[in-house]
Image (tube, rainbow, N blue to C red):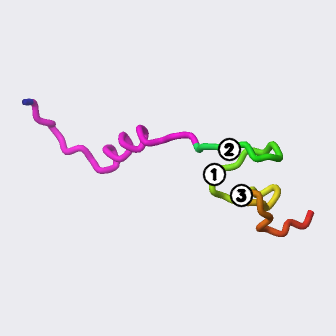
Amino acid sequence: MGQPKRKQSKQRSRKRRGANRFKAPLLIKEPDGTFTRPHRVNPETGEYRGRQVLDLEV
């Protein structure tokens, strides 16, 4: 079996592995029509799971 001529650096290995791991963030559509990431407070309305959790003064 062939052997590598040089040691592969940690940075090079991690770059390769990191490229395979990338996925676009999931977005869910809120009832008001905006898209947010799941399990997070909607920054535009201040709601989480249908409840008002942030006071937003507009």
Q: Amino acid at mark 3?
A: Arg
Query: Residue at point 63% right, 51% down?
Result: 38
Question: Which dot, 3 or 2, sits closer to the camera?
Answer: 3
Q: Which residue is mark 2?
A: 28
Q: Residue 20 at x, y = what percent?
A: 41, 38
Q: Which tag, 3 or 2, sits closer to the chain's start?
A: 2
> Quick one: which residue is furthest to the front in this view?
50
Q: Amino acid at mark 1?
A: Pro
Q: Say above or below: 21 vs 2.
A: below
Task: State the CA–CA distance, disc 1 to disc 2.
Answer: 6 Å
* Left-right relation of 1 to 8: left
Q: Earlier in the sequence, mark 1 or mark 2?
A: 2
Residue 2's place in the image compared with 18, above or below, is above
Secondary element type, mark 1: loop
Residue wearing tag 3: 49
Under circle 3, the secondary element is: loop
